[in-house]
Image: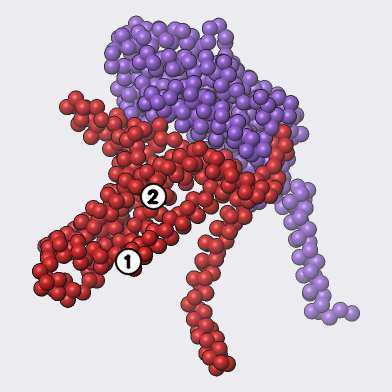
Chain colours: A purple, B red
Amino acid sequence: MLNRNARLTAAAVIAATGIALTGCSGSTGASTGGPVKITFWGWASGYEKSVALWNESHPDIQVKYEAIANGGAGGYDKMLTAAKAGTAPCLAQIGYETFSSFLAAGMLQDISQYVKPRQAEFADWVWGNVGIDGTAYGVPVDTAPMGMFYRSDLFTAAGIAAPKTWEEFKAAAAAVKAADPKARIMNLPTDPYLYAGFAWQGGAPWFGVNGDAWTVSLDSATNSKVAGYWQGLFDQDLVTSYPAFDAALYSAWNSGKVWAEVGPVWSASLIRDNAAGSAGKWAVAAMPRWGTTDSVGNSGGSATAVMKGCANPKEATEFAMWMSTNDKSVSNLIESAAILPASKSGLANAALDTPESYYGGQAIYQLFRTESAKVNPNWRWGPVMSTTASALGDGLGKVPTKSATFQDALNGAQTGTVSALQAQGFSVSK
Amino acid sequence: MTIQRQSRLRELRRAAPFVLPFLLLFVVVYLVPTGYSVVQSFFAVKRSGLGLGGAEAVFAGLGNYVRVFQDGDFIASLGRVSFIGIIQVPVMLGIALILALLIDSSVSTGRKFFRVAYFVPYGLPGVIAALVWSFLYAPTLSPITGFFASIGVDVSFVTDGALPFSIANILTWAWTGYNTILIFAALQAIPEETMEAAALDGCSGWKAALLIKVPLIRPALLLTLVFSIIGTFQLYNEPATMKSVAPNLPSTYTPIMAALRSLSANDFNYAAAQSVVLGALICVLSVLVFRASARSVD
């Protein structure tokens, strides 16, 4: 007969083993006891509320949301470092432009099997941003098709029609300058990601996949065409050249020194919040087209990615899918983060039909809903985007001071990208 | 012998509680990360094809270091900080020395006020100073540019050629006071008898300041010189902040910015090699400065 102490010890050992075993099985995703716990890193406003909504209705899968710094402002660095240290969360907000970089860093988990059944709930091109060749490593949340925001009061007063093609845009640019010598039609897009939207629309991709190697085509002939267009406007003094996202640009929007901005859907809140004085005078039209090609650019949008090492990828995917498609969650995201949903059900959300008083009562998101179906599907981001973007940004930043041209910037980004790829061991196909 | 050893041991044991916390911190927050960086710098990632299978770390020998010295952007960044340093450090220390001598001289009224006034810029966080100066430099917002434009003169502080000087100006503004205080403290330590003796020998005023005071405070001057050189090579806040008003400022403007860019590109090993090279360079420079001055004292 065991004495009391020995029995207690045995019980404790069994209990401890039991805990350890559940702990283990929990990490392989086969746990039966207690709710599954999932950590989620993101920064967009409103995510927290969507997570709270989920947690209320899903007691078995509890998501813990942790707000981190914006991706470009250090959030991605934090994720990369955490992944390297083995402390990465299960889910992470990652912009499409950086998605391939994470993929190539080997930090994401293939969740194709979990998303396949519900793939039809999103437009095809959106999936191209969260995986390669039919695989998926995350669930898209929003997209950012581009449109033309313009001061309808000034255009009407000057008798200039909103341009429908880039040819007409150039003519309109000259007309604006003629109507008011101190005003210009638009500011030069020298931010690398904003500029990417124009290349995207123009069918001038920067990256591709050729078998088992990457192709880099920043210096392709089609890219030169798009770059040449903007260089032309700049050389003829038809655009302003303020730094991107600069207070000087905002004040020019407000005072009528800059009449239009061709930008992604989120420019709507950017203009509204920074040029409050010109409220009610703006309107939105479709992005000007290249000739008769009915295609639109995209600049932004992000996904909920499942990071490698996540113990419960199935449940994580389930939550991510819910966040992007559930009516309540999407309404919340539209309201608090002003996103344009990526899912078809999200695009049908009634919140997108609200008239915007800043834009003279126009229901501007209806336009972007239509345009999102016309986004050029042939675009792929590269695996070293932060290098590509800073190399391109360095070049584009020199255009206003005339120490470089758009073409120089593209050439510099091409060389910088190829050498970064090779230095990091990627195959590059010529 | 044994008695001596024992007493030494006892001394060590007594000193341990005071020394150990420092040693521990020194090892944990300084030696370990430095060592880790050095180890990392000898590795490189190996990928295949599209790289989707993830990366594997392989020993790369001096590969990353070869890359550092072939990296035009990194070499250029070193050139830039050297250029800024060569211009800015002498100007700043010169001004600091003159100010310190002035406060130290017989101008006793307002001595305290000037001491505090000069020190104020150092109290401001570097980023705030850089932000404020950015506004003063921003072509469309700057009141200075605006004033010159109103009298028909076209001035820009953010052209490629003007950038090093604009940055040097912020550095000088922020750090002159700090150096002034260091030099002033050394001046205060000069015994009054020395200056009295000099005065009796007919040496006073500026002559006394240059011939007696300055040589006596050589260690303090040297210290400020080394601090300033290190500071210049670690330049980051000012150019990084100014980038928003000067997009022509490249993202690899200074060595730290270049290393940070490699880090963001997930090129950890290369960023480590860049950091090690920068650290070694600063070390060598500091030693050289100390050596050179020690020799001239002898």
Determine whether A63 is above or below A420 in the image: below
Residue at horizontal 29 percent and vertical 44 percent from the top: B169
Quadrant of residue A42 within the rendered picture? top right
Residue under the image location 55 percent in, 62 percent down: B31
Q: From the viewer's perspective, is residue A400 above or below residue A288? A: below
Comparing marks 2 and 1, which lies closer to the viewer? 1
User: Is there any visible trace of residue A159 in the rendered image?
Assistant: yes
Disc 1 packing (10 Å; few <14; some 14–19; many ≥20): few
Residue A344 drawn above or below residue A72: above
Task: Tell me the kind of residue under disc 1.
Answer: Val
Please give the chain letter of the residue carrying mark 1: B
Q: Which residue is mark 2?
A: B232
Dot 2 falls on a residue whose secondary structure is helix
Q: Which mark is residue A359?
A: none
Subunit that carries the residue with mark 2: B
Marked residue nearer the N-terminal end (2 or 1) = 2
Q: Residues within 10 Å of mark 2 (few under 14, many from 20)?
A: many
- Give, as a three-letter code, the residue at label 2: Thr
In this rendering, position of residue A111 left or right of residue B132: right
Q: Quadrant of the N terminus of chain A?
A: bottom right
Q: What x and y, as percent, mark residue A317?
A: 69, 38
Badge 1 is on which residue?
B297
Left or right placement of residue B84 versus residue B58 in this view: left
Question: In the displayed structure, does residue A202 sit left or right of residue A6?
Answer: left
Q: Position of residue A137 (x, y in %)?
A: 68, 35
- Image coords of residue A419 (percent x, y): 59, 33
The residue positioned 32% from the left and 46% from the top of the image is B87
